[in-house]
Amino acid sequence: MAKKKQSSYKSWDDVNEALKTLAQLKIKKNKIENRQNFMLLKVKEICEKKAGSLVVDIKNIEKEIELYAEENKDEFAKKRSKKLTFGTISFRLTKKITCKSIDAAIKALKALSLDHFIRVKEELDKEALIDVDESLLTKAGIGIKREDKVSIEPDFVTLANIGSEV
């Protein structure tokens, strides 16, 4: 038979000290993560500034290529793409649904009995199911898993009030 694991703590005072340490460690970790996020934001801003003019140049060149292709669209009548040394230009027929009012469109589709064009997302309401009779849930292939979990909540306010250094 496997040996049950035992805590190295011998008293509630040990646990209380561990909670204090846990709170201090979590505060340190949060400070590091906040600093990391701040640094990432700064790096992102620097990169966006450096890339800003490049993005404008890219959009301008793409627009000019698009305009030229549109002006010479007759060359794409038989063959829908043109391979060049540094890339390919092509025309592709695309379709896009536009709708001024989604609610009005849904009502109109329902009125025309075209419900099969309406997407409905179905999912379990787990909060409501938790209170349903288990025998009924079992018939539906649903079970309720029960666990007695330990909740650990360091008291950051008390830690801050005693002026503990982090």
Image (cartoon, rainbow, N blue to C red):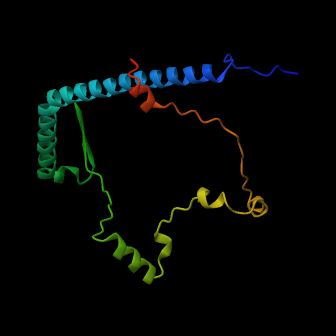
Residue 33 x, y percent position in the rendering: 37, 25
For this orientation, the residue located farthest to the bottom is: 111
Residue 35 x, y percent position in the rendering: 31, 24
For this orientation, the residue located farthest to the right is: 1
- 165 displayed left or right of 155: left
- 114 displayed left or right of 11: left
In the rendered image, the quadrant that contains the C terminus is top left
Depicted 117 relative to depicted 69: above or below = below
Q: How many numbered marks appear?
A: 0
Residue 70 x, y percent position in the rendering: 15, 52
Residue 46 x, y percent position in the rendering: 18, 26
- 86 displayed left or right of 137: left
Residue sitting at x 39%, y 28%: 161
| Residue 81 in sight in this render | yes
Of 66 and 135, nearer the camera is 135
Of 49 and 55, nearer the camera is 49
| Residue 124 in sight in this render | no
Residue sitting at x 11%, y 51%: 71
Depicted 69 relative to depicted 54: above or below = below
Depicted 144 relative to depicted 150: above or below = below
Residue sitting at x 14%, y 31%: 54
In the rendered image, the quadrant that contains the N terminus is top right
- 6 displayed left or right of 79: right
Residue sitting at x 27%, y 24%: 39
